[in-house]
Image (cartoon, helix red, strand yellow):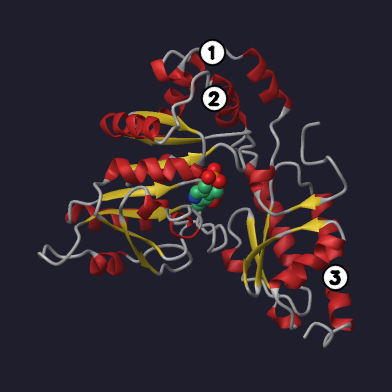
């Protein structure tokens, strides 16, 4: 059975839980296939051409996951031992098993952003000067939308300002754009506004765009050629990958504009939660499909709150000790949001009634 409606449970843990649409399943069934390592899969070739065009770049490469997309891109943009500037709570730094160091052999140089966006002055300051003691800084990574900051958008203007710095020092600028279409939809601008000032980027097919598998790397042809070889080295050369690419084509054609619905639902959810005593939401951060809820006002930690919601059929995820994350996505309706709010109110009521029992 397809769709997030397999049970009564409302799953707001992530937009990765989205299921492919009927149309995607049909496209998979009918996809023309070939061996993509020989570059003979027409469906993959078509998706890569579409993705490159959409992003205003020369070429694209389908990879199995966002994590591999980032790793391949890191390796294609640098040499071992280089220093990479990235945001201190970026996905690459937090959630990718340290592949940046263990596999790519790079030195991550984390700096704090503001709502997920790096300050160009901080970046400039973090670039290691040419000195016999220092590793060479060759790459700056940004994340858009920024996951841990709450799905916040790094604006085209902010990217342009960062680009001025990277160009000045001859560095590459890479964007982990797993949710870049959420950013474009939020600002109601063409996605190329976000890609114009970066050297290369990746985006996810398997999150809000509902594909079962896959991410796409885009950049200039030389970069994508290097990436293709590194993907192969990492074991990501896929044979009849057209079955992954076929739903990707549908995603690019039909699933982008509807992200707006997820954003509206996130705002409704955020406002509702913000109105519940004991919970806090920074509404300024609710720019796309992610809502971060601070539960410290209830005197319980995130894990207890998550468990109380789970008992009632609402799944949310852990962000940090006092913050839980809720993500809206395809399959989550306005009625689900209303029900989620009722569940949250109910859980809060119980926690307050039993306050003291938890410690
Ligand atoms: C989900 C995510 C990734 C990784 O994607 P996977 O397909 O889960 O490996 C990378 N970057 C960001 C910002 C993400 O949100």
Among the two numbered marks 2 and 1 on one chain, the one whose residue lies closer to the N terminus: 1
**Residue wearing tag 1:** 33
Q: Are marks 2 and 1 in contact (CB under 8 Å)?
A: no
Please provide percent x and percent y for residue 309: 81, 64
Among the two numbered marks 2 and 3 on one chain, the one whose residue lies closer to the N terminus: 2
**Residue wearing tag 3:** 347
Q: Which structural element holds mark 1?
A: loop
Give the class, few, some or many, for how many residues have Cα within 10 Å of label 1's Cα (few <14, many ≥20): some
Q: Are marks 1 and 3 in contact (CB under 8 Å)?
A: no
- Seen in the picture, residue 12 relative to 294 is either above or below; the reply is above
**Residue wearing tag 2:** 245
Q: Nearer the viewer, residue 299 or 35?
A: 35
Q: Which mark is residue 50?
A: none
Please provide percent x and percent y for residue 38: 39, 15
In which quadrant is the N terminus drawn?
top right
Give the class, few, some or many, for how many residues have Cα within 10 Å of label 3's Cα (few <14, many ≥20): many
Give the class, few, some or many, for how many residues have Cα within 10 Å of label 2's Cα (few <14, many ≥20): many
Residue 293, by quadrant, is bottom right
Residue at x-position 30% and y-position 40%: 76
Residue at x-position 84% and y-position 50%: 9
Q: Is residue 2 visible?
A: yes
Please provide percent x and percent y for residue 58: 33, 29
Residue at x-position 77% and y-position 32%: 2
């Amino acid at each position: 059975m397809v769709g997030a409606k397999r049970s009564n449970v409302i799953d707001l843990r992530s937009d990765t839980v989205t299921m492919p649409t009927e149309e995607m399943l049909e496209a998979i069934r009918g996809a023309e296939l070939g061996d993509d390592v020989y570059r003979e899969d027409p469906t993959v070739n078509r998706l890569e051409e579409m993705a490159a065009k959409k992003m205003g770049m020369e070429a694209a490469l389908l990879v199995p996951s966002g994590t591999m997309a980032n790793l391949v891109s890191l390796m294609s943009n640098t040499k071992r031992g280089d220093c990479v500037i990235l945001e201190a709570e970026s996905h690459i730094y937090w959630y990718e098993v340290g592949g940046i160091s263990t596999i790519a052999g790079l030195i991550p140089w984390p700096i704090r952003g503001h709502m997920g966006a790096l300050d160009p002055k901080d970046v400039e300051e973090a670039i290691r000067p040419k000195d016999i003691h220092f590793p060479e800084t060759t790459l700056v990574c940004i994340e858009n939308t920024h996951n841990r900051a709450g799905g916040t958008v790094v604006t085209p203007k902010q990217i342009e300002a960062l680009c001025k710095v990277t160009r000045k020092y001859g560095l590459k600028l890479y964007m982990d754009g797993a949710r870049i279409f959420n950013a474009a939809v939020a600002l109601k601008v063409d996605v190329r506004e976000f890609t114009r000032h970066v050297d290369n980027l990746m985006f996810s097919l398997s999150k809000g765009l509902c594909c079962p598998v896959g991410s796409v790397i885009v950049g200039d042809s030389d970069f994508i050629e290097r990436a293709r070889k590194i993907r192969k080295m990492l074991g990501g050369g896929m044979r009849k990958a057209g079955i992954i690419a076929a739903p990707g084509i549908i995603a690019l054609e039909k699933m982008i504009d509807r992200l707006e619905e997820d954003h509206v639902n996130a705002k409704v959810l955020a406002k509702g939660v913000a109105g519940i005593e004991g919970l806090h939401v920074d509404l300024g951060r609710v720019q796309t499909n992610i809502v971060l809820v601070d539960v410290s006002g209830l005197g319980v930690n995130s894990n207890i709150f998550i468990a109380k919601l789970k008992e009632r059929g609402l799944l949310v995820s852990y962000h940090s000790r006092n913050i839980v994350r809720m993500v809206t996505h395809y399959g989550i309706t306005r009625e689900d949001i209303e029900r989620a709010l009722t569940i949250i109110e109910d859980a809060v009521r119980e926690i307050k009634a039993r306050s003291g029992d938890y410690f």
